Image (tube, helix red, strand yellow):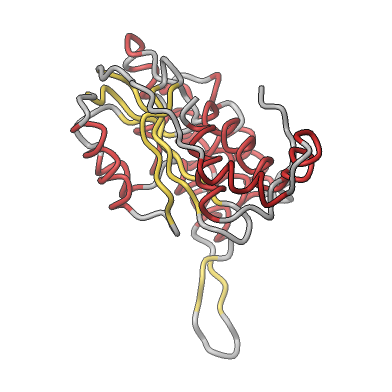
Amino acid sequence: MYERRTISQLAGEYGRSINWVRKQLESYELPKKDIIPCATVIVADATYFKHSSGILVIRAAKTKQNIYWKQIDRERINDYYRARTFIERKGFTVSAVVTDGRPGVRGIFGDVPVQMCHFHQKQITTKYLTTRPKLEAGIELRSISQTLCSSTEESFSSLLESWRLKWHSFLKEKTINPDTGKWCYTHRRIRSAHYSLRTNLPYLFTCKKYSRLNIPNTTSSLEGAFSHLKELSGIHRGLSYELKRKMIDEILAK
């Protein structure tokens, strides 16, 4: 665990000025760390810092080593393509990938097993249904989504299909705008939650289909690293871009 000290604290500890501490940090060269290439399941995800850019990270699931990271201003499909190209040129072979479910990203890894992160899927469902849906259809659909981690593909698919058949007419209800005469689906948010679950279903149980690969069902191993990065970035708000980059590189290289 890192000992968290600000530049002012370091200046006091060494009896030097803040400018002297900054110069020492700016001149510091990160040690190169050799990572032996291998066939690996990777976890891929991106995070963003407040009022700043983001970072895309690729982690080897088994060793929990970060094998690629790159600053990004927003998440593009090409960022994942470049990441895969980079790690494969370094000698890594991607056995499978865990992602947040972005369809275009799945295409980049279409030749290997793809696992949709269960945590992200639950987040998507909650975004549409909230944590306390008011309508019975929403309550039931949220209840089904909450069984995701403990279900098999067969049982989850069966529950989802039974729900769809039960609420078929409800999902098709329409509301007409009296001013424009145009219509829209009455229960759009419930429809969206259902659509997300059905669309991602082929990728939700990959970890069980390929159990020999030991594929994680979430990107949570990266979430902890992201939380740590954001916490340290908040503590060291006054750092220059170059020093922040070095700090991030140092943490992700561990």
Residue beneath the point at 61% across and 61% down: 51
**Residue 220 image offset from top left, x and y in percent:** 55, 29
Q: Is residue 178 left or right of residue 73?
A: right
Residue beneath the point at 54% across and 55% down: 241
Residue at the farthest top position: 212
Residue beneath the point at 31% across and 45% down: 80
**Residue 34 image offset from top left, x and y in percent:** 33, 21
Residue 122: quarter of image: top right
Can you say whether 183 is above or below 73 in the image?
below
Q: In this orientation, which residue lies closer to the viewer: 64 or 103?
A: 64
Residue 228: quarter of image: top right
Can you say whether 139 is above or below 43 in the image?
below
Q: Quadrant of the N terminus?
A: top right
**Residue 183 image offset from top left, x and y in percent:** 50, 76
Q: Is residue 89 left or right of residue 102?
A: left
Can you say whether 167 is above or below 113 in the image?
below
Q: In this orientation, which residue lies closer to the viewer: 241 or 146?
A: 241
